[in-house]
Image: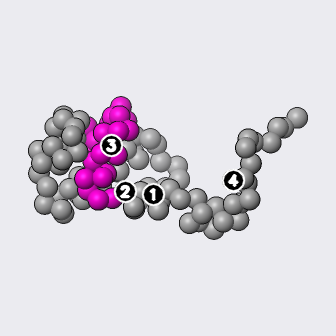
Amino acid sequence: MLTSKHTGEELGGHLGESLRQWRIILGLSQELAAERADISLPTLRRIERGDPGVKMRSFLALVSVLNLVDRFIEAAEPLETDLGRMRAHLLGRQRARRTN
């Protein structure tokens, strides 16, 4: 389990490993998952290793193939958290307040 004091490298590695596990659970080979996501096999391997240099398009294509889009959207939705609901009024602002 990651904590709030994780490094980007740790997060990438954890996320990549989770995607690899989902691929295996779904019974997809690396070759088939890469083909369905329209990415190269080396790109898929980079995603599964947590390489931060992978393009977002490639990452999201794999997330889609693994049928995880709804989970990612839900996880990132601020209004699904207590803090987000408490501060929902801030979302109507066009820009942040100026500080003097």
- Mark-to-mark CA distance, 1 and 3: 14 Å
- Mark-to-mark CA distance, 2 and 4: 23 Å
Image quadrant containing the N terminus: bottom left
Q: Badge 2 is on which residue?
A: 69
Q: Badge 4 is on which residue?
A: 91
The quadrant where residue 72 appears = bottom left
- Give the amino acid at mark 1: Ile
- Give the amino acid at mark 3: Phe
Q: What number is the disc on residue 73?
A: 1
Image quadrant containing the C terminus: top right
Give the percent coordinates (x, y) of residue 9.
40, 40
- Mark-to-mark CA distance, 3 and 2: 11 Å
Q: Earlier in the sequence, mark 3 or mark 2?
A: 3
Residue found 18% across the figure and 63% down from its top = 25
Residue 9 in magenta?
A: no
Give the residue furthest to the right: 100
The residue closer to the viewer here, 54 or 2, is 54
Give the percent coordinates (x, y) of residue 46.
25, 37
Q: Earlier in the sequence, mark 2 or mark 4?
A: 2
